[in-house]
Amino acid sequence: MSTASAETTAQLPPAAGRVFFQPGVGCAGSGPMQRDDPVPKKQGKVTVKYDRKELRKRLILEEWIIEQLSELYDCEEEEMPEVEIDIDDLLEVNSEDERAIKLQESLSDCYKPTDDFVRELLGRIRGMRKLSAPQKKSF
């Protein structure tokens, strides 16, 4: 689940804020849907808080990674070999040298030089934080 191509869709939670579910309300917000049987209407709510700024930075970085890997492997994302670049794993590593080694190992089957990509990626993740699970508020 941590391949570069899978990261763009996996582990990205929905937007922050409150989401309200109103039974009987149409998708277009046109009011209650007509029902034959009267059912008491309850309003449910789910609250999850995410750091939207961090999520946006992460998405931009993952899109950049996919673009760069497409150039390095001379292919489209669908044709790209399995390359595992897990940003959270890289952020857990303490030193830049260890991060670089981990990236080079992931790119070992690439026939093009990867030094520029590794250097640029390390620069881009500098200062980022590991994404944590969303904080659920209790009611």
Image (cartoon, helix red, strand yellow):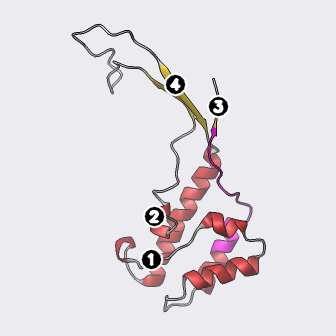
Q: SS at mark 1?
A: loop
Q: SS at mark 4?
A: strand
On whether residue 123 falls in the magenta region, the answer is: yes
> Marks 1/2: CA distance?
10 Å
On whether residue 26 falls in the magenta region, the answer is: no
Q: What residue is drawn where x is 75% and y is 76%?
A: 96
Location of residue 114 in the rendering, given as x and y in whole percent from the top left corner: 58, 86
Q: SS at mark 2?
A: helix
Q: Name the residue type under label 2.
A: Ala
Answer with mark 1 or mark 2, whichever residue precedes in sequence.
2
Asked whether, in this view, residue 132 is left or right of residue 59, the answer is: right
Q: SS at mark 3?
A: loop
> Marks 1/4: CA distance?
39 Å
Few, some or many residues within 10 Å of mark 1 (<14, 14–19, 20+): few
> In the rendered view of the protein, which quadrant contains the C terminus?
top right
Answer with mark 2 or mark 4, whichever residue precedes in sequence.
2
Q: Which residue is mark 3?
A: 137
Few, some or many residues within 10 Å of mark 3 (<14, 14–19, 20+): few
> Marks 4/3: CA distance?
11 Å
Q: Which residue is mark 4?
A: 45
Q: What residue is drawn where x is 69% and y is 71%?
A: 123
Few, some or many residues within 10 Å of mark 2 (<14, 14–19, 20+): some
Magenta part of the protein: which range? 121-135
Q: Name the residue type under label 1.
A: Glu
Q: Name the residue type under label 3.
A: Lys
Q: Which mark is residue 82?
A: 1
Q: What residue is drawn where x is 68% and y is 58%?
A: 130
- Tag count in the figure? 4
Q: Which residue is mark 2?
A: 6
Query: Is 95 drawn above or below residue 110 in the view shown?
Result: above
